[in-house]
Image (tube, rainbow, N blue to C red):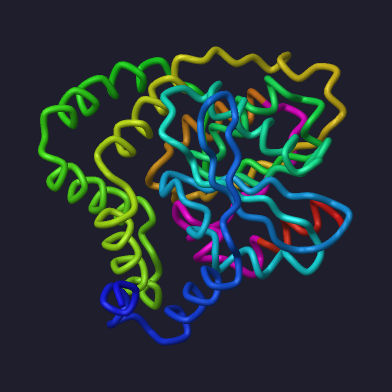
Amino acid sequence: MAFDHYYAGVPAEQREALRSFREEHAAKHAIIHGTEWTYYTMGQGEQVILWLVGGLRVADAAHSYIPLMQDHYRIIVPDYPMLNTMDELANGLAGLLDAEGIDRACVLSGSFGGMLAQVFVRLFPARVSKLVLSSTTAPDPEQAKAQNAPITLLGWLPGVLARILAKQQLYNIIDPPAHEAMFYKAYLNELFSIRLDKAAIISTLRCLKDYNLHRFSPTDLVGWDGDILIIDSADDATFSEQGQQAMRRLYPHAEVYTFQDAGHSPASTQQGPFFSKVREFFGS
């Protein structure tokens, strides 16, 4: 089996956790504004979590975290289709909530997903009750300019090379703790071998550029009755302290929790405290 090939060197507990997640949760599909979305639902409870993963794009990137929440919350977690703007993705998320009969949800987001969540709450504030923005940043027009070169370069590169470069970059961004290093090497190898192609990588970069062209203001959410929790790390090597401070200025009334020595992925490196904080914020 392909799965056993990719995950042969991974510790059994980590390998079987991913296998079990995939076996237990069947994909759902919905056509929204002409685009097919794939998503998954699980859990139980009156509150709903719309779970937005980061730049890995696929729902099972959160497979090891979802069990920590699903006993108390109903969860919907999508894969991201190959669209080129954050507004298109946000409109699709609203369509997924409609498809599942969900009026309002708590949004749990990280990194790329946190950028998408900031667009979503501005377009559809009535659909969001509480918002967690983890390890993410504010729009920066200078970053939009900087993304022109990689988008152009990837357009010229052979697909195999584009996937190799993306795999290496994402591994460096995740910077997994030592006990998860083999898992993430295998996961990214599988992801960029049989699940994501060059078009998906370019889609991510175009959405990042589009995000950085947005203009946000601290007054955007005046009148919204929801709450925001910002979670960041003092040693996040992906998003600068300047970007973290920009988040605080954008959301002056947000609760802020800063991890020490957690890197870009506190949900992984500080899993227990991270999800304890999220559960406390969401309530149940």
Identify the residue at horizontal 36%, vertical 31% (top origin): 203
The magenta stretch spans residue 231: no
How far across and down, in percent of the image, does residue 6 sit?
Answer: 28, 72
How far across and down, in percent of the image, does residue 23 sit?
Answer: 54, 72
Instruction: Name the residue nearer the viewer: 1 or 21.
Output: 1
How far across and down, in percent of the image, does residue 118 sit?
Answer: 62, 29
Query: Horizontal placement of 176 versus 28: left or right?
Result: left
Query: Horizontal placement of 242 versus 226: left or right?
Result: left
Residue 147 position by quadrant: top left
Task: State the residue lying farthest toward the bottom.
Answer: 12
- Which part of the image, by quadrant, shows the N terminus? bottom left
Total label count? Answer: 0
Q: Is residue 171 above or below residue 102?
A: below
Query: Horizontal placement of 212 versus 175: left or right?
Result: right
Q: Which residues are magenta?
A: 251-274
- Which part of the image, by quadrant, shows the C terminus? bottom right
How far across and down, in percent of the image, does residue 254 sit?
Answer: 74, 35
Residue 84 position by quadrant: top left
- Kindly tell me whether residue 134 is visible in this rendering: no
Instruction: Name the residue nearer the viewer: 97 or 247.
Output: 97
Identify the residue at horizontal 81%, vertical 51% (top origin): 282
Query: Horizontal placement of 86 versus 178: left or right?
Result: right
The magenta stretch spans residue 269: yes
Identify the residue at horizontal 67%, vertical 38% (top origin): 96
- Kindly tell me whether residue 83 is visible in this rendering: yes
